[in-house]
Amino acid sequence: MRISIVGMGRVGLVTGVSLASVGHDVTGIDTNLGTVEMLRQGRCSFYEPGLQELLAEQVAAGRMRFTSAVGEALPGAKVIFICVGRPAGANGDLSMTSIEAVAADVARHASHQVVVVVKSTVPPGTCERIERTIDLERPELRFHVVANPDFLRGGSALQDALSPDRIVVGASDAAAFRLVRRVYRDILQAGCVLIETDRRTAELAKLASNSFLATKVSFANALATICELVDADVEGVGEIMGADPRIGPAFLQAGIGYGGFCLPNDLASLQRLALRHGYHFDLLAEVARVNEDAVVRVARKIEDALWNLEGKRVALFGLAFKAGTDDVRSAPALALARMLIESGAEVVGFDPIAADVAKDEIAEMRTVTDPYEAAEGAHCIVICTEWREFRDLDLGHLRGLMRYPVLVDGRNLLDPAAMREAGFLYMGAGRGGRPSDPAALSPAPLVEAASDG
């Protein structure tokens, strides 16, 4: 089937590559000429495991092409996916101007009987507004508008696209449902659950899902605070809770908080949506507050351990908002870096993938290409992203490089007993309450701490 996808960001490109890989003829459209040229060469502008390899394969096979010329790509397409971003507007709401512009392009260039599939995350009623825009621009065009929200996770987006746990389709016409089933036929035949519903329900489902996931994360972080106060272990509490099938273990890991684009923005979008309709969804405001407080609490732990932050060197291990991606949007590591820099600390960051992107966001932060280089001369290490390689660090070598052996584990990634046995002052999130006694550390760092005071 001939498919055009408008917007070659993370959602649009992953969607296009996955559909091309199951045999569709896909054209990707983006207004950024540099992005288009990279994609034509089979290169991605962002990192997602396995994506660049599969992209290069589909480009070489001729199943995927790229252009910036909307007028060339839309005519003849049976299905047009809208995957454009929604930048923040002046009032804090995410702007709908890009989506409106695509609707106008569809009206000008699309062929009859086209199905417009909205994959961008949008508030309920957006499909109807797109429909109205197209009708006003070109009343004779025969088309359908369908809601098909994405549920892709950063770091596993390609796998989620090829083997999703569910596909949600919201439509108002049986023919539209049938055509979208054809688009996903091979994926559905592999056993994926298909949920067909009305458009507004489908649109709201994405905002609700991400807001609920954010709520679970903030609950775990608030619980970690209680665990520290009563000397309990949040990992054990979370394991017990997660064993209940009504709760499940996912998103119950305490730490430095959630980040990325989707959870913070979808939470805020749902809260504003509720407020516009006269309902104060105060729970969501508290979820966001607890998430912000998780970073503040890590900063306080660092300051408590180091006494003063001014002139101290802090190494951040992990800069992306989660492992498996180079996405630093709303990354807790960057929020922490800004707090530390404002307090006079020197911040050195390491990330296996996202260092260059993070450096573009915070020029004052020095980035290095090796975790041991980041640790050299550091007064404190903070684990901000759950990269697997941080589990395999040589603790003896790491401690020997540091000025003070202080480690704050913002992802509860390491074993507290092993860290303390290696001589570290170790602080996790909700892991037994109190850090190891500084008096148990070797004299050298304590002498240095006193001389710096």
Image: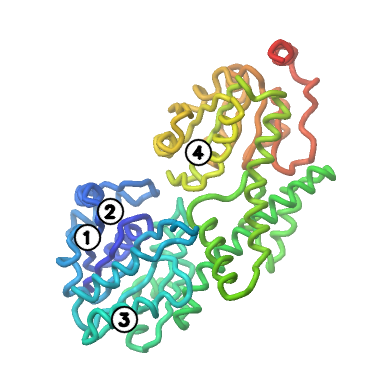
Mark with earlier residue (1, 3): 1
* Residue at numbered disc 4: 319
Tag 2 secondary structure: helix
Mark with earlier residue (2, 1): 2
Query: Which amino acid lies under the numbered mark 1 shown in the image of this protein?
Result: Met
Relative to 399, is 124 on the left or the right? left
Numbered disc in front, either 1 or 4: 4
* Residue at numbered disc 1: 64
Instruction: State the image coordinates of residue 229 (x, y, percent, origin top left).
Output: 82, 44
Instruction: State the image coordinates of residue 206 (x, y, percent, origin top left).
Output: 50, 68
Tag 1 secondary structure: strand
Mark with earlier residue (2, 4): 2
Which of the 4 image quarters holds residue 358? top left
Q: Residue shown at 69%/23% (left/top)?
A: 308
Query: Which amino acid lies under the numbered mark 2 shown in the image of this protein?
Result: Leu
Relative to 314, is 149 on the left or the right? left
Q: Are marks 1 and 3 in contact (CB under 8 Å)?
A: no
Is disc 4 surrounded by few (<14), some (14 to 19) or many (20+) residues within 10 Å? many
Mark number for residue 179? 3
Q: Are marks 2 and 1 in contact (CB under 8 Å)?
A: yes
Relative to 30, is 327 on the left or the right? right
Mark number for residue 359? none
Query: Which amino acid lies under the numbered mark 4 shown in the image of this protein?
Result: Leu
Is disc 3 surrounded by few (<14), some (14 to 19) or many (20+) residues within 10 Å? some
Mark number for residue 55? 2
